[in-house]
Amino acid sequence: MIISFFIAVWLMESCKKNDLENNPAATPLAIVIPPGFPPISDAYLNNPITQEGFDLGKKLFYDGRLSKDGNFGCNTCHQQFAGFATFDHNLSHGFNNQFTTRNAPALANLAWYREFHWDGGIKSLEVQPLAPLTASNEMAETIENVLLKLQQDEDYRKKFKAAFGSEEINSQRMLKALSQFMGMLVSANSKYDQVKQGKNSFTAAEQRGYDVFVQKCSSCHKEPLFTDQSFRNTGLPTDPYLNDNGRMHITHRAEDSLKFKVPSLRNIYVTQPYGHDGRFYSIGAVIDHYRFSVVNGPTTDPLVKNKISMSDFDKLDLLVFLRTLTDSTFLNDKRFAQPQ
Amino acid sequence: MKTKLIIILLLCAGIFAGCSKDKSISKESNQVTLNFRLTANGEPLQPGTNYINGSGETFTVSTFKIYVSSFSFRNVGTSQISNTDPACFLINMQDPASLKANVTLSSGQFNQLVFYVGVDSNRNVSGAQTGSLDPLNGMFWTWNTGYIFAKFEGNSSVSSNIGNSFVYHIGGFRTGENAIRKIILDFPGDQTITSGNIGTEIRLDIDLDRWFTGVNNISIASTPVWMEPGGLSLELADNYATMFSIQDIITP
């Protein structure tokens, strides 16, 4: 009788929402909201960040064992020196000589995002890693197997205990730790940010470029995140091999055909190539697409339908301005670097 | 005095049901056991056995998993309702232990069982979860955040899919794609459960024939594979809602 009550309680407990509790001895860490930034999302209300959770998440992020053959950690496609995008690759390498089907997004300021992936199919950062982990052309693993590998590592057992209070290694703890690490990747100390805070000033060319940016780009690439997180069709002809209809794949609505999430422009000088399939190998090529090559269809965004005209001088100034979005402290921050 | 005691008991049961962190459930709480039996073609479901569906197609079953959740009782005549036990359970053909679930419900006079097939929309977007909702259970779409409510896989010679397999992963919780279904089942023969449910066992059948015929006619040959919200997921959700029936209620 008593046992069955305990079972009843256990079963009731067994699908509660998010009852994970941190190790009470863990050191709290906060995402510092940079001046002028909006509040972060609610994502960390039931996943409070601690130093220990962050350290565990970082170890996981840089661990190739999360992939089938040990070669593909998260950091393989999300490289710090490239703003946590894949440097110089339109698509990323995955298991067994395969490619991904979309360009790896740069990871910065994720705590402000509501949806993830180019098509917004991911509604919580916590569950995002499940996609590359289990995709046969990416890390090609199973969750069971990953957990088995972690459980056999004494350092992981120690780190799980430090973060969550016991050595139990389960998917929820692993995913929350990863989310804690990723949430701390805040990029807000570029020259642009320093100018905005009155600590630095633009050169004349940078200022002119900023003016062009505000006038012609900022409706979609809204400051300070440099994205308004909306989904738009920017008139890119469909690649016949990839045949990617973007957000429509998620919502099944015709009006979402060929729409992709507006990416942030932060650190854009190191995150090349550009576009959901990485088809642009320079920022100049992207700008020229808007100036000359927009292909109009039923869902093409009104803001680009008539193309975005600018002189060659404007374009050069714009390029100079965009360089001010490079945040060297972020790209070199030892806190986010591969653990030694 | 007796009424006051009953009221206090009801209040306690209500508090226990809603407050999942409370581990001190007393002997007076009302535990009901749900005993599920999977059937096909009128007999208990066996993996590997040949069955025939409503379209005359012969098939075998290799995987059948389905989420049921949020159980409560009600009385059609008096409109009395019990608390709702929020727990969700993953019934898995391959795991006999999963065919039995315990819920805690307040006492009263009831003649209907109410529950849901699927996972509520809130839990679909609440991030990483444990227990029956652990992504380890293979019931979560990694590319389109949300739970697979029902997974039905097997083989049929009429299937054009690889290895003659058929694969149905049914889910979806957004407006226009909602595959969550509310199930209301009358107790057989006007039976009611009164004044305390301790030791009560409700035996339910899940009839897989109705996966193919419940409301819409589903043919393996026409559509051997479906793995996303909307479209066939909606048709199959209407079908799977008809699979459940109460065979028997055992009261102590």
Image (cartoon, rainbow, N blue to C red):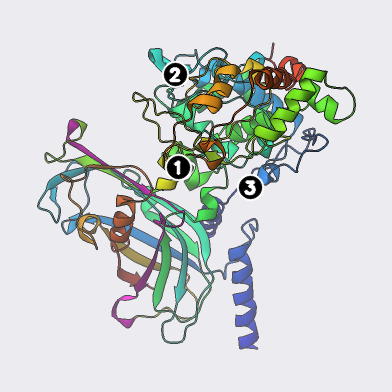
Task: Report the chain holding disc 3.
Answer: A
Classed neighbour count for the residue bearing mark 1: other residues with Cα under 10 Å, few (<14), some (14–19), many (≥20): some
Under circle 3, the secondary element is loop
Asked if the residues shown at circle 3 and circle 2 are in contact, with their CB atoms under 8 angstroms apart, the answer is no
The residue wearing badge 3 is A19
* Amino acid type at mark 1: Thr
User: Tag on residue A68?
Assistant: 2
Q: Is residue A217 visible?
A: no
Residue numbers of the magenta segment: B163-190
* Same chain for the residues under marks 1 and 2 in the image: yes
Mark 3 vs mark 2: in front: 2
Q: Quadrant of residue B143?
A: top left
Q: Quadrant of residue A303?
A: top right
Q: Is residue B64 above or below residue A173?
A: below
**Farthest-out residue, right:** A199
* Amino acid type at mark 3: Asp
Left of A37 or right of it: where is A274? left
Q: Is residue B109 above or below residue A203?
A: below
Marked residue nearer the N-terminal end (3 or 2):
3
* Amino acid type at mark 2: Lys
Whole-number angstrom distance, CA of label 3 to CA of label 1: 42 Å
Whole-number angstrom distance, CA of label 1 to CA of label 2: 39 Å
Nearest to the observer: residue B96 or residue A106: A106
